[in-house]
């Protein structure tokens, strides 16, 4: 699995959710070992959190894709040994070769938490889409009704020689932390932002109450989010009604902000009034943030480059007079073998003796003429 900065959704996996890697080759004659199958790379957006279903059905975190370094999520089976691997001083004509080994499989859960410098938070229809369209090249849908935006929108904002990524989070309603208005879907994207721009609708019935409500939702969803720095911005200053109450609203908001220490900015996303100044304030706030504060979430333990799978223990059991052997090694050998050839049977017996399997079969009571089964292959013990 590899992070790809050019994509920002998981839709390409949603409709193709079962992914197979190529088979490895079987071992062959003439000293040829089976080739390994080609690796399969699954592109996902930067910010994808990967969980794996454990044996008890629980989700366990295995990685957090924050860059384009590939992460191994399932290991392939090794190629089969060729016939030369089974030559010995007393066996100068090896006729055995191995089938390629089975690869691993994993059931994964992917959760996208987009990475952005600035998260744009507001109630529906506050002007977020207009603002991000005004200050970046993002083409957000703009309309005069709530929930125009139904998925996060990313835009790159340039300020002088610097730039930052701003993310518009779809409008939040009271109860968002409980999933109201798809609150969980929206809030998880805002977790990764370094700084929040809290956009308030100047024409709202009570912008101060809107400010308190959204901060309460952040606190309920994840207390760490509520502690992140915010810039409080009132939109629609171009409307006479909002301009006339600017001073009073500023005082009330500063009182509600309290010791957060944020000033209150007034802008018009529609006309651009105050927008350039706000972008400069955002750039200054980001530059002043300590480097260790860029991401509050802990870095998970990286996955091993090659997970080790313990080989299953060989077992012998008797079913309806047939000795059924569970042995990955012997299944791989017999799958490629011509068991009609007496030389093949002799060399299989030699491999069973080396591994101790022959002794276990004798202890289990096997006698000449009894049938042995390895996977789907049956041979006669002699």
Image (cartoon, rainbow, N blue to C red):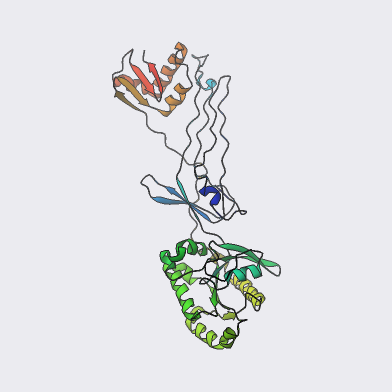
- Left or right: 137 in relation to 104: right
Q: Quadrant of residue 184?
A: bottom left
Q: Quadrant of residue 309?
A: top left
Q: Nearer the viewer, residue 188 or 50?
A: 188
Question: What residue is at 42 percent from the left and 37 percent from the top?
Answer: 310
Question: What residue is at 50 percent from the left and 78 percent from the top?
Answer: 260
Question: What residue is at 54 percent from the left and 59 percent from the top?
Answer: 114
Give the farthest residue toward the right: 161
Q: Position of residue 224 (x, y in %)?
A: 46, 67
Query: Which part of the image, by quadrant, shows the C terminus?
Result: top left
Q: Nearer the viewer, residue 125 or 296?
A: 125
Relative to 289, say whether 91 is above or below. Answer: above
Relative to 52, say whether 190 is above or below. Answer: below
Q: How many marks?
A: 0
Relative to 309, say whether 284 is above or below. Answer: below
Q: Position of residue 277 (x, y in %)?
A: 65, 77
Relative to 368, say whether 101 is above or below. Answer: below
Q: Position of residue 63 (x, y in %)?
A: 49, 51
Give the farthest residue toward the top: 342
Give the farthest residue toward the front: 144
Q: Position of residue 104 (x, y in %)?
A: 47, 38
Question: What residue is at 30 percent from the left and 23 percent from the top?
Answer: 318
């Amino acid at each position: 699995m590899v992070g790809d900065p050019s994509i920002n959704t998981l839709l390409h996996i949603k409709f193709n959710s079962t992914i197979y890697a190529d088979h490895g080759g079987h071992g062959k004659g003439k000293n040829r070992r089976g080739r390994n199958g080609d690796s399969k790379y699954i592109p996902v957006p930067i910010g994808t959190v990967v969980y794996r279903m454990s044996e008890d059905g629980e989700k366990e975190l295995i990685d957090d894709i924050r860059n384009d370094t590939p992460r191994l999520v399932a290991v392939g089976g090794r190629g089969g040994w060729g016939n030369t691997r089974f030559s010995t001083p007393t066996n100068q004509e090896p006729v055995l070769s191995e089938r390629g080994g089975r690869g691993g499989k994993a059931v994964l859960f992917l959760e996208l938490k987009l990475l952005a410098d600035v998260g744009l938070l507001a109630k529906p229809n506050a002007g977020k889409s207009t603002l991000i369209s005004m200050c970046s090249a993002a083409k957000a849908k703009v309309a005069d009704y709530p929930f125009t935006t139904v998925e996060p929108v990313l835009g790159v904002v340039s300020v002088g020689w610097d730039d930052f990524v701003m993310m518009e989070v779809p409008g939040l309603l009271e109860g968002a932390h409980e999933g109201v208005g798809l609150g969980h879907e929206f809030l998880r994207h805002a977790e990764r932002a370094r700084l929040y721009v809290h956009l308030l609708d100047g024409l709202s019935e009570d912008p101060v109450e809107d400010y308190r409500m959204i901060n309460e939702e952040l606190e309920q969803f994840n207390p760490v989010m509520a502690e992140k720095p915010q810039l409080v911005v009132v939109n629609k200053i171009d409307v006479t009604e909002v301009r006339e109450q600017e001073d009073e609203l500023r005082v009330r908001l500063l009182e509600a902000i309290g010791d957060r220490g944020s000033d209150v900015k007034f802008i018009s996303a529609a006309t651009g009034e105050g927008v350039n100044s706000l972008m400069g304030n955002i750039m200054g706030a980001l530059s002043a943030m300590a480097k260790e504060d860029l991401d509050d979430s802990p870095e998970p333990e990286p996955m091993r480059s090659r997970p080790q799978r313990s080989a299953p223990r060989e077992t012998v059991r008797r079913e309806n007079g047939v000795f059924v052997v569970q042995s990955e090694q012997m299944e791989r050998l017999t799958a490629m073998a011509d068991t009609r050839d007496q030389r093949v049977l002799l060399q299989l017996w030699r491999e069973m003796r080396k591994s101790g399997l022959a002794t276990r079969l004798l202890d289990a009571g096997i006698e000449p003429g009894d049938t042995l089964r390895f996977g789907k292959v049956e041979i006669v013990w002699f």
